[in-house]
Each structure stands twice: as structure tokens, then as C-alpha cells.
Amino acid sequence: MKYLRFGPIGAEKPGALDDDGRIRDLSGLISDITPALLGNLPTDLSDAPVVDASPRIGMPVSHVGKCVCIGLNYSDHAAEAGMDIPTEPIVFMKATSALQGPNDDVMIPRGSVKTDWEVELAIIIGKTAKYVDQAAALDHVAGYAVFNDVSEREFQAERGGQWTKGKSCDTFGPLGPYLVTPDEVPDPQNLSLSLSVNGIERQSGTTAKMIFPVAEIISYLSQMMTLHPGDVIATGTPPGVGMGMTPQTYLKPGDVMELTIAGLGSQRQTVGAD
Ligand code: ZN
């Protein structure tokens, strides 16, 4: 099933896609797609009315508790970044205030000179995970989603301290359009993902190239922190970011990013400036 939230910012309603690809309004059945409801969402859409319009799409779960990101998880991206291949997952946090709907504008923050793109597979946790082993890790997944780990490289790497500074700016976390349940994603390590800027493909990769696969990431993080329902984990980006281009190329107002992961849907963001 593909679950989503639709409507104006702050007033999103819960929904799901039916077999014909139409949005069904679930607001008569549940108040919202909340962390507490993950794993217990309606599956019978027969009483849910069809939404005829083409509403704004929000991020597919409300009240995300934390957003944990994995850095340099594709060997070919590590190479373009000039970094060694990590021997343990590189972990950083993105402020949840950066998260937004998949097609909302991305705003270049004041003082930015190096705002960049990163298409990623996101995991949305569905069951509390603490000290889980890899064999049980995927049982804790509510679903998967497309994610743009928008990054300000100068904030991230040239101002000292942690990557979090360049990862947490407002609008730097488009998530969705859908939370796609694992039954529709039988192998999360076999998904193609791509990103274009102004119609020119910049990133193209496959989750088969992850250094640390989804199950290992969940298990690894759960040794250090409890993962709660609704937590989002961004699993790293394939090569083709602006920082890796010659010359380096960064986003400017008016640019349009389009992201796709096979089976998970697409995002489209117009870039603006704060
Ligand atoms: Zn990333």
C-alpha cells in the first residue's frame, strides 16, 4: 500500500492510493498518519472517498521524532567526495524542522553558496527497535520513501564541527510522496534511484551499491539509540551530486529538481531563496 498525506501545510489529511492510482481520503477512518498508527493503518479503501482534485502532497507521516542520516554509504559517492570508504556507518542528524512535502519549494538559506542535492532511499520505522540483530531489522520498517537530503556544503564542511549545520536548514528534507509498505518493496537493495536538475540527469544509481544495507543500518543504529515509530533514516546518496561535478555546480533560484525511486514515486521541487 502507498499511504500519503494531502492538503495545505499544517492541515494535511491522511490518504492512500487505490489500485487505479487515485487518492482515497482516509480522514473518515483515522485522524492522521501518525507514528502511533504505523503498522495499523487502514487497508480496506472501499469506504474511503476518491479525491478528485490534485492536492498538495505533504510528507507521509506526521510528528517525525528524529531524522538520522547515513553519510558516504555508496562507494562511488565517497570517491567523488574525495573521502575514504567508511568502515562503520557515518551517522549524522538532520533537524526534523527541515522535513517537508515532496514537492514543496526548497529554499536556499541566507549566506549559502553551495546548496546541493542528494536523492536517497528513506526508511520509516514502524516498530520500536532497540538492540535488534540484522535478521530481525526489516520487521521494524513501516515503509520506504523518496528523500532529498538537501545539503549546504560550505555549512557542512568548511565551518567546523558537525555536518548537521549543512543538513538542517529549513526545507532541506523533502520526504515522500508516499510511505510504501514493505510488501511492495520485496528487496530494498534492488531499487534504482535518480535525480535531475532542470531536466538533466545528475544522479543515477542503485541501492545494490550501498556499503551498509538497510538491515545493517537499522541494526547498527539500534545498538546506540532506540528507534521509534515514525523515525526517518536517510540511507545515503549515489554519485552525481553538485559537489562532485567539474566544475562544482550548486543550486540557484529557479532550478527544478526531480527525483525518482523505482516503485516509490517521484518528487519535484523548485528552488527559491530565503
Ligand atoms: Zn545524504
Image (tube, rainbow, N blue to C red):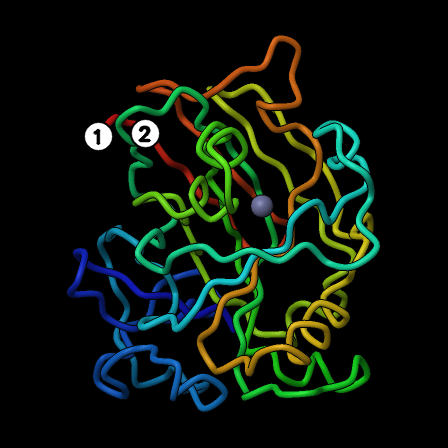
Residue 147 percent across, percent down from the top left: 51, 51
Relative placement, left or right, of 10 versus 65 is left
Q: Percent x, y for residue 64?
A: 38, 70
In this figure, which residue is indicated by the disc labeled 2? 108
Location of residue 77 (image quadrant):
top right
Q: Secondary structure at mark 1?
A: loop
Residue 253: give x, y in percent of width and height: 31, 19
Drawn side of residue 92 relative to residue 21, left or right: right
51 over 227 or under it: above or below: above
Q: Residue at x 65, y 31 (%)?
A: 203
**Mark closer to the chain start, 2 or 1:** 2
What amino acid type is highlighted by mark number 1?
A: Asp
Task: Tell me the number on the disc at residue 56.
Answer: none
Residue 235 location, quadrant: bottom right
Quadrant of ligand 1 in image: top right
Residue 132 in picture, x, y percent from top left:
71, 86
Which of 119 and 180 lies nearest the eye of the viewer?
119
Q: Return the residue at label 1.
A: 274
Q: Residue lying farthest top? A: 247
